[in-house]
Image (tube, helix red, strand yellow):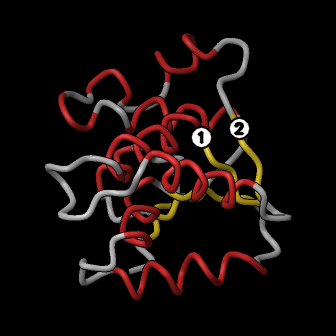
Amino acid sequence: MSYSIDADILLYDRNQEDSHFDSASRFISKRTNDPDLLCMTWPSIMAYQRNAKHESIFENPLSPEIAWSNVVNLLNRPRATLIQEREGFAGAFETTPSALKVRGNLRPDAPVATILQQNGVKRIYTVDSDFRKFEFLEVINPL
């Protein structure tokens, strides 16, 4: 079985000032020995990178070096891999339920969902309930 983690969980794991920090850190720590395969997508990684360093979002944003080392450490786990678009992504995106109806801030979720679907990943851990629009995904809020 495989799963993915959305950028929001990774951000909570690094923001010690947030009320979700402890829960997110425990969740991420438990994934180290998870027998399931962690499948990360570039869109989620880039969302984490963009937001973790953003001074308007965090009182103490991460430096670019620390934000990137967090990604490298996550991907270097024994049961982690990076997945990406496969051939036919545009067609898959068009036929992904709800993908073309998503607008505004929800727009970044659709490519992530399509990449997960193309790679057979059916579970995502996130606090973003908008992923529930994609019927093929099991959406779990671990916090």
Q: Is residue 71 left or right of residue 33?
A: left
Residue drawn at (65%, 59%), measured in percent from left and top?
3
Q: What x and y, as percent, mark residue 118?
A: 67, 32
Label drawn at residue 1: none
Q: Is residue 91 left or right of residue 56?
A: right
* Quadrant of the rendering where the C terminus is positioned: bottom left
Q: What x and y, as percent, mark residue 80?
A: 76, 57
Mark closest to the chain's N terminus, 1 or 2: 1
Mark 1 closeness class: few <14, some 14–19, many ≥20 residues within 10 Å: many
* Residue placed most toward the observer, 134 or 23: 23
Q: Is residue 32 above or below residue 89?
A: below
Mark 2 closeness class: few <14, some 14–19, many ≥20 residues within 10 Å: some
Residue 57 occupies which quadrant of the picture? bottom left
* Residue placed most toward the observer, 33 or 2: 33
Give the structural element (helix, strand or loop) at label 1: strand
Q: What x and y, as percent, mark residue 92?
A: 57, 19
Q: Is residue 92 above or below residue 90?
A: below
Q: Is residue 122 left or right of residue 55?
A: right
Give the residue number, with chain letter if any, for mark 2.
83
Q: What x and y, as percent, mark residue 39?
A: 69, 51
* Quadrant of the rendering where the N terminus is positioned: bottom right
Residue 104 occupies which quadrant of the picture? top left
Could you tell me how far apart the alpha carbons at marks 1 and 2 are, in whole angstroms?
5 Å
Residue drawn at (73%, 59%), measured in percent from left and top?
2
Q: Is residue 34 above or below residue 49?
A: below
Give the residue number, with chain letter if any, for mark 1.
41
Q: Disc 1 marks which amino acid?
A: Thr
Q: Disc 2 marks which amino acid?
A: Ile
Residue drawn at (21%, 60%), measured in percent from left and top?
58
Q: Are marks 1 and 2 in contact (CB under 8 Å)?
A: yes
Residue drawn at (33%, 71%), measured in percent from left and top?
15
